[in-house]
């Protein structure tokens, strides 16, 4: 790998890390503010929220990885273009495939990490029957023996209506006068 390829690869990895951390933090903060009343109801609820948030990170990364890669590539090329480095590389004789080769070489380990995350880490962090939240999950990954499979819970209309009615009857008023 040449110095130029290494420079592009390091720039891409740095942007991938920044976008990944930013997007995961954005989702976790949105989740926190969506459940803020329940989180501060007791210390146990806060600890349960922290535990469920930590367990949801592999799932968030799995869902956000395509957009993280796209944004990191855009940020890398815009940074190279902003500093006229991309123009200098083209003038020096680097073709489009030579400029894309570092991205492709970096994306092979990124794809391997995505495979490991989806098939091993996500199943290890969320073992069967360890759901700590009181909300039903619709789709989740579970380890069954040596295989990891996606389990989809499909509710009928009657079950969905019964859950909605139960939540409405258990709801507390927002404002106390």
Image: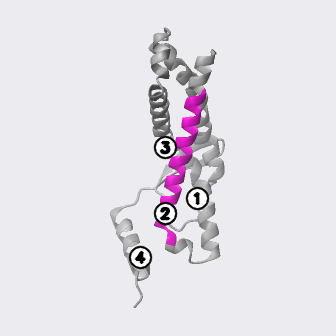
In front: label 4 or label 3: 3
The residue wearing badge 3 is 64
Mark 2, Cα crowd under 10 Å, few <14 / some 14-19 / many 20+, is few
Task: Identify the residue under disc 2.
Answer: 136
Where residue 159 sits, quadrant-wise, is bottom left
In front of the other: label 4 or label 1? 1
Report the magenta residues as a range: 10-36
Q: Residue at x 44, y 80 (%)?
A: 170
Colour scheme in the image?
one colour
Q: Are marks 2 and 3 in contact (CB under 8 Å)?
A: no
Say which of 144 and 53 sits in front: 53
Give the CA distance from mark 4 to mark 2: 13 Å
Q: Position of residue 137 (x, y in %)?
A: 49, 59
Q: Residues within 10 Å of mark 4 (few under 14, many from 20)?
A: few
Q: Which residue is mark 4?
A: 166
> Whole-Å distance between the Cαs marked 1 and 2?
16 Å
Q: Is residue 108 visible?
A: no
Q: For mark 1, what is the residue?
A: 53
Mark 4 and mark 3 lie on one chain; the one further toward the N terminus is: 3
Tell me the quarter of the image containing the C terminus: bottom left
Q: Position of residue 85 (x, y in %)?
A: 50, 22
Image location of residue 165, percent across then percent down: 37, 75
Question: Looking at the rendering, in which quadrant would you find the N terminus?
Answer: top right
């Amino acid at each position: 790998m040449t110095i130029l390829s290494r420079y592009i690869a390091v720039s891409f990895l740095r942007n991938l890390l920044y976008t990944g951390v930013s997007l995961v933090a954005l989702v976790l903060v949105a989740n926190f503010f969506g459940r803020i009343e329940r989180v501060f109801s007791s210390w146990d609820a806060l600890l349960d929220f922290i535990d469920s948030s930590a367990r949801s990170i592999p799932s968030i990364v799995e869902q956000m990885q395509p957009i993280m890669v796209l944004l990191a590539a855009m940020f890398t090329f815009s940074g190279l273009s902003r500093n006229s480095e991309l123009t200098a590389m083209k003038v020096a004789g680097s073709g489009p495939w030579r400029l894309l080769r570092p991205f492709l070489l970096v994306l092979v380990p990124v794809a391997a990490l995505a495979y490991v995350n989806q098939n091993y880490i996500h199943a290890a962090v969320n073992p069967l029957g360890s759901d700590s939240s009181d909300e039903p999950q619709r789709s989740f990954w579970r380890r069954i023996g040596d295989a990891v499979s996606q389990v989809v819970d499909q509710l009928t209309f009657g079950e969905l209506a019964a859950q909605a009615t139960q939540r409405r009857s258990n709801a507390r008023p927002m404002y106390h006068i």
